[in-house]
Image (cartoon, rainbow, N blue to C red):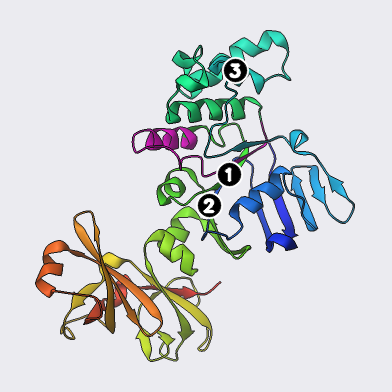
Amino acid sequence: MSELRFDAGHSGRDVRAAFTVAAGETVAIVGPNGAGKSTLLALIAGLLRPDTGQITLGEHVLTDCATGIFVPTHRRRTALLLQEALLFPHLTVAGNVEFGMRGKRHGETPAARDRWLQSVGASDLAGRRPGELSGGQAQRVAIARALATEPDLVLLDEPLAGLDADSGPAVRALLARVLGRDGQCALMVTHDIMDAVAIADRVMVLEAGRVVELGDTATVLARPTSQFGARFAGVNLVQGVVGPDGALHIDDLVIHGVWSGAERPEPGRQAVAVFGPRAVGVHLSPPGGSPRNVIAVSVTALTAHGDSVVVTATAGATIFTAHITAAAAAELRLAPDAPAYFAVKAHEVVIQAAQ
């Protein structure tokens, strides 16, 4: 199978990126609305033509602006999965999957079709029409139809966004099982952290049409280096500079922590500190004891989150969040605009060089 190499841009959409996706690898693309995530997929699929750069899939040049090469969508050996299954309403489930296999020899089609339906758990749906399927069932069939084309690359634009709480996890588990199984690479746009955790080998953070972070899933979610990556992972991220004491300095705020990486950057270099919201203690006055990081904040919001309460607060221009129990929130009697103190032990904070 083939790897994807993307080094291209579209000035009209303000997208300019460079990255590689290895054969058999799935990369999740996350970012704020309007960051260019769907535009990126459209450029790769051939639905949109870049005005600079090159896109290759294995040994095949899909787009080369310098030479004028532009392979049409239907010849790119790519499959595209969207929020809507977009099954052909006049065909049965079996007919939809067979449509993706129309290049095979006639005698091979029924057996291969049945294998794909079985692989997505849809064998019992073969005779139904799309109008008789639930959202989860339709998406399973769409996955089978896409993979039956034997693509080298699968592009997914929020394929689980329209599914309910029951079918979403099942289709997510299905994608985790089948993507990359035959060596194809995949790019998946998502807003759901569970998609990244369950399916992706790496996570790419896209902001304003640029790749601001790209790394293995565990690292990006545990130690993000971008503001959106931190929000996506649900952690606190503070950007500042390295001080002479090895701590992170931002205005009058000093954050002590444990350095990630073999070498500590020199004083004055850009760095970020990351810590989880559950590592934050919330107090009405400066606490005694061991916390090295005590931050005077102003509470901006209180939000219920399961059996806990998310306390959002600011210190200057920096936003922090803490997860505390509902009982603790009631005891503290926190309210918007109230002063408070966030305390974090140094060993709970990871500091790393900014990318």
Q: Position of residue 100 (x, y in %)?
A: 65, 23
Compare residues 342 and 331 and report the one nearer the observer.
Answer: 331
Q: Position of residue 41 (x, y in %)?
A: 64, 48
Q: Quick check: 92 above or below 86?
A: above
The numbered mark, 2 or 3, whose residue comes first in the sequence reads: 3
Q: Which residue is mark 3?
A: 90
Q: Which residue is mark 2?
A: 202
Q: Residues within 10 Å of mark 3 (few under 14, many from 20)?
A: few
Residue stretch in magenta: 151-176
- Quadrant occupied by the N terminus: top right
Q: Nearer the viewer, mark 3 or mark 1?
A: 3
Q: Are marks 2 and 1 in contact (CB under 8 Å)?
A: yes
Q: Are marks 3 and 1 in contact (CB under 8 Å)?
A: no
The numbered mark, 2 or 1, whose residue comes first in the sequence reads: 1
Secondary element at image label 2: strand
Secondary element at image label 3: loop
Magenta segment includes 31: no
